[in-house]
Image (cartoon, rainbow, N blue to C red):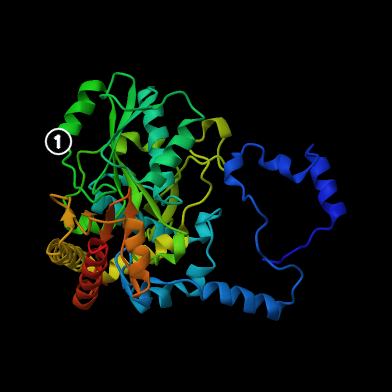
Amino acid sequence: MRFLPHTQDDRKEMLGSIGASHIDDLYENVPAECFPKNPINLPTTKGEIEVERIISAYAAQNHAAHNGAFFLGAGSYYHHIPASVDHIIQRSEFLTSYTPYQPEISQGTLQVIFEFQSMIAALTGQEIANASMYDGSTAVAEAMLMAKRITKKDNVKIHGKLHPHYFDTLKTYLDRFDGKIISDELDENCACLIVQTPDFYGNIHELEDLRKACDEKGALLVVVINEIVSLGLLPPPTLADIVVGEAQSIGNAMMFGGPYLGFFACSSKHVRQMPGRLCGQTVDADGKRSFVLTLNTREQHIRREKATSNICTNQGLCATAFTIHLSLLGEEGFKNLARTNHNNACKLADRLAQIKGVKILNDNFFNEFLMEINGDAEQIINNLVEHKIIGGLAIENNKILVAATEMTSAEDIEKYAENLARELGALGSK
């Protein structure tokens, strides 16, 4: 995409066309605390060579997951991606495909979407899955809006610890509609009960009692899955009405925060209220297998007031990477990947529990758990970075959220344990 610099006269003309006197008028709805208090420290008017050097120096300050022992999860997980995934998605028919506005000439794109939908439906135990969403957070928010449309109710109940980014996105959506997130028991005006499992702290939730509560109050049960690899070991959430979450773990690197891959699945009776697009399989005039856009409820394709979502694309390339990777794994490979994740997390928890001043807080978990330490969590994590260890996410003052995947080696675990013990011992001696 070309960079087109604008002159001051260009900017003035554009602002005048939309009735704005200053560029700051465009951001009047953004809270003041979100703006930087000081100018961003970036140089002005540099040549291309100088810009490349400056940006490369900034990038060199990053400490990537592969640069040392890595135990950070919290919604973005360090998994191995086979080289074949990147090789295949770099093919021109995948890399340049955007969105099938003319589906009859986009058979390859439509087939990938259809296969992705089929895989998500199988993993989640649901009847229908869409062509993907922006990410897990927007998928949760769209599930809430879908539940409100179906039930004609306003409020939302959250069970357990929902990812805080998902919570913020949910609240942002809900602020524009009637209703609120309630802290009391599920009531008659609740559109849905939302539960993440494993939740943000790694705890696994049973769904039977939640299903009963939803049936009694006429609410939908929305299950959120932030780590899709867990579905290789845990049973699919068939009791849910809607299953949403994040699929970054398969085929997609962490990429310092995105783009990611939201998924959305539900029972077939609710399909016309599902956001996004749905690809289907049929036969053409010659009787050959072919693919079509079966359902488009996006505001680009129908009257805006009839649209179920204003999300105007699916994460096509990310969904393609997911589909390729999962195809390579197969059912048994996916299950083995999940077992490896869980086993490594158990080994990590057992080893850390041996350290004086460490307490594991989870009774059950998949590949992520919360530990309590006798020390300042943020300080400990910062100190560990000096030893090329990313020790997890600080929670409150003295808790750390820790994750392990197939990328976690026995040497990584021992290095973490030894350095954590040393840090806690040093604090205890003061």
Q: Which residue is mark 1?
A: 208
Q: Position of residue 284 (x, y in %)?
A: 42, 56
Q: Residue at 22%, 66% (x, y): give it.
A: 425
- How far across and down, in percent of the image, does residue 352 sit? 17, 64
Whether residue 280 is situated above or below residue 209 in the rendered picture? below
Seen in the image, is 148 located left or right of residue 222? right
Quarter of the figure with residue 337: bottom left
Q: Is residue 300 above or below residue 305?
A: below
Judging depth in this view, the residue of 179 and 354 nearest the camera is: 354
Q: Which quadrant would the N terminus be assigned to in this image?
A: bottom right
Q: Residue at x 41, y 28 (%)?
A: 149
Camera-side residue of 368 and 90: 368
Residue 148 horizontal side relative to residue 414, left or right: right
Q: Secondary structure at mark 1?
A: helix
Query: Is residue 236 at least partly visible in the picture?
Result: yes
Q: Mark 1: which amino acid?
A: Glu
| Figure check: 95 above or below 401 | below
Report which quarter residue 114 is drawn in.
bottom left
Quarter residue 218 falls in: top left
